[in-house]
Image: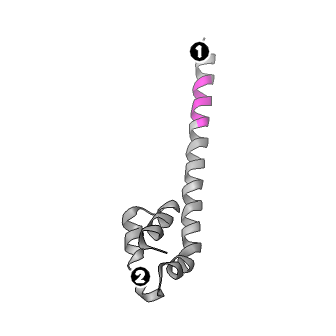
Amino acid sequence: MTRKRFVKLAMSHGFSRNEAECLSHYVNAFGSYSNLYAHNKSRMHIKRWIRDAQDTASKIVKTIIDFTNSWKSILTL
């Protein structure tokens, strides 16, 4: 795996480019980007789950606010 591919995979799991680049500097300790990715895969999945949960929570809050505003406009008629 190339460094560029590793960085793109890390970014797809919710890491910023800077975080992914910093993580890629540990390649010497693991021998290859594939080994580095395999070692950090669970951490990357957790980061992605957290990001997805935050997105879902934001959508739920927005829906509740829209629903509340709709009821306000109905009740003020």
Q: Residue furthest top?
A: 77
Q: Is residue 15 above or below residue 62?
A: below
Q: From the image, which quarter does the C terminus lie in?
A: top right
Q: Residue furthest front?
A: 2
The residues colored magenta run 63-70
Q: Residue at x 54, y 65 (%)?
A: 47
Please check the rendered image and state whether residue 72 is part of the magenta-colored stretch, yes or no.
no
**Rendered location of residue 19, percent (x, y):** 40, 68
**Rendered location of residue 12, percent (x, y):** 51, 60
Q: Is residue 69 above or below residue 24?
A: above
Q: Which residue is mark 1?
A: 76
Q: Residue at x 58, y 18 (%)?
A: 73
Mark 1 and mark 2 lie on one chain; the one further toward the N terminus is 2
Categorize mark 2 by other alpha carbons within 10 Å: few (<14), some (14-19), many (20+).
few
**Rendered location of residue 48, percent (x, y):** 56, 61
Q: Residue at x 44, y 88 (%)?
A: 29
Q: Which residue is mark 2?
A: 26
Label 1 vs label 2: CA separation?
A: 61 Å
